[in-house]
Structures are given as structure tokens and as C-alpha cells.
Image (tube, grey):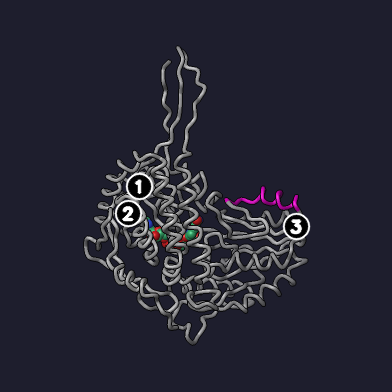
Amino acid sequence: LSIDIPETLQTFLRGASASIVIGADKLGAADGAEAVTTDPATGAVLATIAAGGPIDVARAVDAASEAFEHWRRLSPAARGRILLDVADAIEAHAEELATLETLDNGKPLTESLYIDIGLVSQIWRYFGGWTTKLGGQTLPVSPPVGEALVYTQREPLGVIGAIVPWNFPLLIASWKVAPALAAGNTVVLKPSEHTSLTALRLIEIALEAGLPPGVLNMVTGLGSSAGQALIEDPRVAKVSFTGSTETGRRIITASAPSIKKLTLELGGKSANIVFPDADLKAAAQGALAAIFLNQGQVCCAGSRLFVHRDVRDELLAELETATRAIELGHGLDDSTEMGPLVSATQRDRVEGFLRAGTQEGATLLCGGQRPGGALSHGHFLTPAIFTDVDDAMTIATEEIFGPVLSVLTFDDEAEAVRRANASAYGLAAGVWTDDLKRAHRVARELQAGTVWVNLYNVLDPAAPFGGYKASGYGRDLGEESLLGFTQTKSVWIGL
Ligand code: NAD
């Protein structure tokens, strides 16, 4: 695969080496440690990145603590203006950021541009608009003696640690950083060691757009080193984390000594249910988008497709034909519909699930192969569909985080809901039906933080996103995420 990297990006990539951002400074790790980040479609090295550790995190928290004293006192209008300017600057750099995201993560450029970066600027704009609307309440209280007035105010928490994964690197970083800053907090961001580049570029862009130094800092490096240090630092008031359920459990334990507040967005095994009264063409397209977007590396992927027995054969025929036609390639190639998995480790993991599926008795209808030729140097896997899947099989219970769809058959509505809910996770669910009453009834019964009816994998800055059960707690996006970066004070005035 030969891909031309634009000259401006080549300059950025050369300069990305040793790239912890503290205040306005780009630094190397205190101990000089570095790691390379590669293009998952070719295996080529893109840049070297500083592998930060506890000393770097402590410095970043120093900078964020100092900046907090100024940032929290800035008028809401002034804070909002800066976030809106950052949104404009992101929009002006959208193509560059999308190209960088595709190089680092592998996803097709159209996805990077229209889903990831498109939403990123909207998110900064949405939360920029909230700074002037974060009000409190006046409360009718009845003290035992005399009279009093009580009002509440929303105050920022202080320094926020944001720890994000590699599947939507800039999008998830933004949906944590923007509301945290809007509420008056300052941030230390720890991107995934696999995909640090767009976050690094974002900070440069934000500083140019007028974000004061120290308000947003970043320490690149491993979760076990930089991430752990961020959780253990007692000066960090809250950690907002997105990643695996396993890491989430570790974070809960490590945060206990400092009683840190947490928002945890964890894994999923989302059910997507197709009823016989659905528009089957739309359901087939929706089921494919639900599982194969971003090579299936989506926390809310519709990885368990429940299809009513009456429409199973027709739907499966559509799915198989469309899946076999999906074009794999480098994300910067115009004809590419699906890129590589993010790393060799991730591909190996997904292959382990493919083997488990077959061993446990499911039928691999198509896909699950490593393509040869020009794609053999990247971490590609052809998109896979399993049929004859049983609810208890590994591929029906565990998060695969790859392009693997499990198709299950059901006979009635109550059964579909019961089996959809029989999961440790509860991040999202999909419902395909033209029956209005059924749509609302099933949406109400599903145990999931997001239910999509007749669409899937659509997000908006205004709509809260997060999990039930082992998919985590707290919410990203919407007013709810903003409030999660505040604490409430009740002020009593004796009258
Ligand atoms: P991961 O848990 O391995 O890593 C996520 C982040 O945590 C990375 O930045 C990593 O460096 C850091 N980390 C790892 N160990 C740590 C530790 N001990 N202390 C502190 N930080 C640590 O997850 P991943 O492989 O990057 O991402 C895939 C997972 O993320 C999947 O399980 C997916 O479902 C989940 N995810 C969830 C959502 C959501 O909103 N619920 C969104 C995207 C991804």
C-alpha cells in the first residue's frame, strides 16, 4: 500500500516526537522514554511519542491546578467564547485532523471526517453554549427558628483526569474535555498509547485559538504508568474514563484511597432486534452499520443481531451479499469501506473469538480471514457473520470489539426482550419495527443507556450516552455530562 501523507502532516508527525503537553510546552518524558505509533494499514511508523510516567503526570497536574485558579474565575461568557473559538478552529482543520485520525487508527477517511471530526466541532460548540446556562435553584426551606433563603450553585470540581481509548480518539477526548472545561475545570488528558496524534494536534489548535496554557494538558504513555499515576494523584478530583470493563474495575480500586469521583464508560454487547414488521432493507443496512462501523471497534456495536424467525432467511441473504461486497483497504484510499483493526494484538484477539465461535458450534457464514496481497502488512480481517449462535456461546456473551456479527433467531417479542437483556452489559440496543406501539414498548423494556429505533450508531452532543449494568456509570454528552463535572453547593442566608 503506498499512501502519500500530505506535507503539512509530515511536518507535524516529525515534530510529534516526545510530545507531552504541559501548559504551552511540548516536552519529552522526564525519563526520556518513547514509543512508536504506527499506521495499522501498513505497519509503517508514523511518529515517536513520549511515554510519560508519574513525574510527567505530577507536572501536568501542577499546571492544571495553577490554571484552575484563573480558569474558574473567568466569566462564563468569556469561557464560552474560547470554547466556541476552539470549535471554529477544529472545523477549519477538519480535513487535516480526519486524515491524521485515519492514519493513526485505520478507519476510512469518510468516517473520520463526517462522524469523528464532524461531531468533535459540534461538541465543542454545544458545550461552549452551556457556560452561560449553568444555573442553580432557590429553595423554599422551613428552618425551626426565623427565616432563611437557600440557593444552590454549581461549582467546578478542580482538575479532571480524562483517560480515553483508541477507537474514537479525538471524539471521546472531546466529549470529556469540552464539558469539563465548560463547567470551569481544568484537564489532564491521557490518550491511548495507540492513538495519541489527534489529541496532540487538538491541543496545538486549541492553544492557537486562545485556550489559556495549562487549562488542557496531555500526558501520552501507557495506561499502567501514566494512566495509573493520574488515578492515584490526590489532587485530581475526578477521572472520566472510557475503555474496557476490565480496566474500569482496576480504576475503581485504584481510585478508592483518594475517594475520586468517577465516570466510567465501559464495554458492551448490544442487542439489535429485527421484528417481522420492520422495513427489511433498512434493517439490513442498519444492522451492517451497527456492527461494521469502525471495523466493529465500537463500544455500542450491535454485535448480537436478534432476527425474527419469519424474516431470518431473507435478512441473512441481504446481510451476506452486502458483507461479502465490503471493500477493505487503506483508510485514505477513496474506494475503502473498511480499514484494518487498530493493532496486531487486537486482530489476534478477534481471531481468538472467531476460533471460539467455530469450536462452540456456530456456523461462520462469511469473513474472518486475513486478506493477502497489498493488505497483508496491515491488521486487516474480512467482516464476519456467524449463524446458529446460542445465547451462551462466547461470541454471544463477550465483547469482541471487531467486525464479527452473531445472528440469533427469536419467535416473539417477550422472548426477544428477555434474551436481549440477559447480558452483563447494558450500553445500547436497536429495535427495527414499523409498529409504533411495539417500538415504545420494547424501548421501555430494554436495559440499555441508549435505544435506537429504526436507526443505529447515531450520536448527538445533546443526547446523554452511557451504560446500564457493567457498561459503566455516569454519562457522557448532554447536560448530564456537564453536571457530572460540577458539585452543588447550598448557600443558607438567615433573613
Ligand atoms: P483499555 O481499557 O485497554 O484502555 C483505555 C484507556 O485506559 C487507554 O488510554 C489506556 O492506556 C488506559 N489504561 C489502561 N490500563 C490502565 C490502568 N491500569 N490505569 C489507568 N489507565 C489505564 O481499552 P481500549 O482497548 O483502549 O478500548 C477498547 C475498550 O473501550 C472496549 O472495551 C470498548 O467497549 C471500550 N469503549 C467504551 C466506550 C463507551 O462509551 N462505553 C467507548 C469506546 C470504547
Q: Which mark is residue 77?
A: none
Label 2 or label 3, whichever comes before in sequence order:
2
Residue 440: in magenta span: yes
First along the sequence among labels 1 and 3: 1
For label 3, the SS is loop
Q: Position of residue 95 (x, y in %)?
A: 45, 67
| In magenta stretch: residue 183 | no
Of labels 2 and 3, the one closer to you: 2
Q: Position of residue 2 (x, y in %)?
A: 43, 83
Give the residue pinned by disc 3. 434
Q: Quadrant of the C terminus?
A: top left
The image position of residue 32, as x and y in percent, is 22, 65
In which quadrant is the N terminus drawn?
Answer: bottom left
The spot of residue 372 in percent (x, y) is 50, 85
In the visual, does 118 lie left or right of 487? right
Name the residue at 30% across, 70% down. Answer: 48
Q: Amino acid at mark 3?
A: Asp
Question: Which element type, helix, strand or loop, lies under badge 1?
Answer: strand
Q: CA distance from mark 1 to mark 3?
A: 46 Å
Q: Are marks 2 and 1 in contact (CB under 8 Å)?
A: yes
Residue range (magenta): 436-449
- In the depicted view, which residue is nearer to us: 384 or 481? 481
339 lies above or below 137: below
**Closer-to-camera residue (306/160):** 160
Residue type pointed to by label 1: Thr
The residue where tag 1 is placed is 186
Task: Tell me which secondary structure the magenta stretch mostly adopts.
Answer: helix
Pointer 2 residue: 217
Badge 1: how crowded within 10 Å, few (<14), some, or many (20+)?
many
Q: CA distance from mark 2 to mark 1?
A: 8 Å
